[in-house]
Structures are given as structure tokens and as C-alpha cells.
Image (cartoon, rainbow, N blue to C red):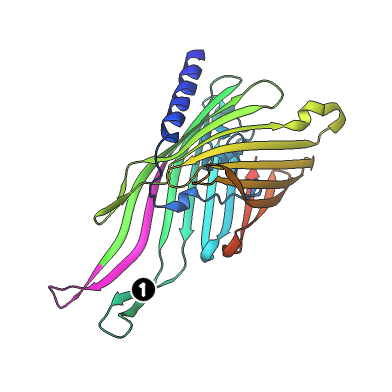
Amino acid sequence: MKRLTIITLAVCLLVQVGFAQSKLGQTGAQFLSVGSDAWAGGMAGAMTVVEMASASLLFNPAGMARMDSRISVTASQNQWIADINHNLFTVAIRPADGKYGVLGASLISVDYGELQGTMVWDNAKGYIDTELLTPSSYALGVGYAAVLNDKFSVGGQLKYIGLDYSRSVYPDINENADTVKSHIAYASAFDFGTLFRTGWHSLAFGMSMRNFSNEVRFEKEAFQLPLTFSIGIGMDVFDLVRQRMGNQQLMVTLDAQHYRSSPEQILMGIEYRPLSALALRAGLYTSEDENSGSFDENDLSFGFGINQFGLALDYAYTPMGVWNEVHRISARFSF
């Protein structure tokens, strides 16, 4: 078991170092990079070491391994920018009290709303309207997580992704009839993560790799999915003064994220629990400036959660500048 742990950690480190030196490139299916969970949204997405039961499939599948309930369900609704509806559903089952690990499944669906289709035409505008288009996307995943020893856990998820970008209508220069082409593509992707409890109070380290896949092709053009690597650290800092703080908790998390298509980001999250049933959250996004290499403040996020009798409701608010604001709502149930 010790050898397996060391080998896994070594592979994760080598993968992180190798990809950190790659150049930025274009990617598609960006909905896979959007965090719709309200718990995570309130903490700026710095969730690599946070154990979220079934919702861990969205950030680090290893965080699902130690869930203490038999069944966990999460449903979220995200009013994303440009009137895009981003919804998700996750479920996890712990058979035989976790003896054989934890099984999970996830579904992300995206509705981009209605878009006016156009077609090239010989008139003053150069085009005419055709029909209303309703593009959409989804990702369906199946995951597994297991505890390898008292400190180390691993998890993974296999996803099937569908992209339906509606259709195009344009005149055919060789035929009298117009040509209609549907823009639909499918892909598979893999997520993997590890979580390491140090044994010193609640200090933990984590790593995740998300959206590892082959190229996706539309017609003659191909693109990559938004591959993302995360390294995180987190701790309940009230553990250092536990006798004075009683049952209060103050979880502080820090994630470093490397993207295939955008500069690195540092994410910081804070969750304060004055009571076991109430959580107050805040987060900070920072991103690297491509010219100076320094990290500048980007955005704040805020949220709260209420938890009682196995049912939890979470809300997150994120200002998005010219895109106004983003609201996320999640409901969780476990027993």
C-alpha cells in the first residue's frame, strides 16, 4: 500500500510539472470549466481538498471516498452569464459501509437559450434570418473513489460529452437547394484526483486532473477539451486554538490551477461555521498577468449554507463585471 501511495504521488507530480510548461491553446466545451455548485461558488472554486460527498466528482473525485452517509445527492442550478442555464446533478452510493469504495454519477446539462440563425444572402445586409437555434451541451459521468489507508484516498471519473451546436443553412454553389448541416459532436474524458490527510490536525493536500481527452472534431476543425490541473491545500485553522473556539470551524483553502487555454489562477476560499447548521463563505479569484507574470486581484465571491436533518441548501453570489452577476443555488440530501 505504501508503494502504491508513493507511485501515485510521483506520477501526479510529474504530470503537473510536465503540463505546467505547455503553451496555451484553444479549447472548446468550456461549460466543463464552469463550477455550478453553490458551496464551491461561495469559496471561489477552491475545493480540491474539500470532501463534498457526491459533489466532489466536479472538483476532485477523491473527496468522495470518505463520505459518511450511505447515499448522497446534489442538485444545482446556475444562472450563468449571457442568460445561459447551467444545471448539474450528482449522486454517490457507499455500499457495504465503504468496504468496496464509493460509486458515483454526475450529469451536467447546459441550455444556451435561443439564438437567431442567419444565412448569407444577396441583399443590402448581406444575410437573412433563418430560424431560432437552441444549442445545448451535456456531460454524463460515472465515478469511483476509495480510501487506500488512513491518510490517502484516490478517485476517478469517466465522462461522456455531447455537444449540440444546432445547425447551419447556407446556399450551395453547385446545387439549387440550400445545404443544411447539423453541428453535433461527442467525446469522452477522464478525471482523476488524490487527497492526502497529513495527520497534523485537519491539514490536507490534494491534486486533481480534469477533462483529459482526445481532440473533438466538427467538420474539418478540431479542438481540445479544457484540460485543468489543480493542486490544493486546506485546513480548519481553528484546530490550532480548539479549546478556545469550541465547535466553531474556519476552513481555509488555497488552490493553484493550471489551464490549457488560459493563464494560471490562484483561488482562495474561506468557510466559517459558527454552528454546525450554518456556513458563511467567501472566496477570492486571482489570475496571472501574461505580460508581468504577477497575480492580480480578479473577483470576489460570497455564499452561505444551511444544513439540518440531512438536507442542505446553499447559495452563492459572484459579481462578473460587464457580465453582471452569477447566482448559484444547490440542494443536498444525504442519509
Residue in front for this viewpoint, 289 or 45: 289
Residue in front for this viewpoint, 130 or 46: 46
Q: In the figure, is residue 298 to the left or right of 189?
A: right
Residue 97 in picture, x, y percent from top left: 59, 28
Q: Is residue 168 magenta?
A: yes
Residue 293 in picture, x, y percent from top left: 53, 42
Mark 1 Cα-neighbour bin, 10 Å: few <14, some 14–19, many ≥20? some
Q: Residue at x 60, y 47 (%)?
A: 296
Magenta residues span 159-180
Amino acid carrying label 1: it is Gly
Q: Residue at x 41, y 30 (%)?
A: 18
Instruction: Identify the residue at the far bottom of this view.
Output: 124
Residue holding disc 1: 117
Residue 288 is at least partly visible in this image: yes
Q: Is residue 166 magenta?
A: yes
Residue 262 in picture, x, y percent from top left: 46, 47
Residue 94 is at least partly visible in this image: no
Residue 290 in picture, x, y percent from top left: 49, 46
Quarter assignment of residue 133: bottom left
Q: Does the magenta stretch mainly form a helix, a strand or a loop?
A: strand
163 over 260 or under it: above or below: below
Instruction: Identify the residue at the far front of this view.
Output: 292
Does dot 1 land on a helix, a strand or a loop? strand
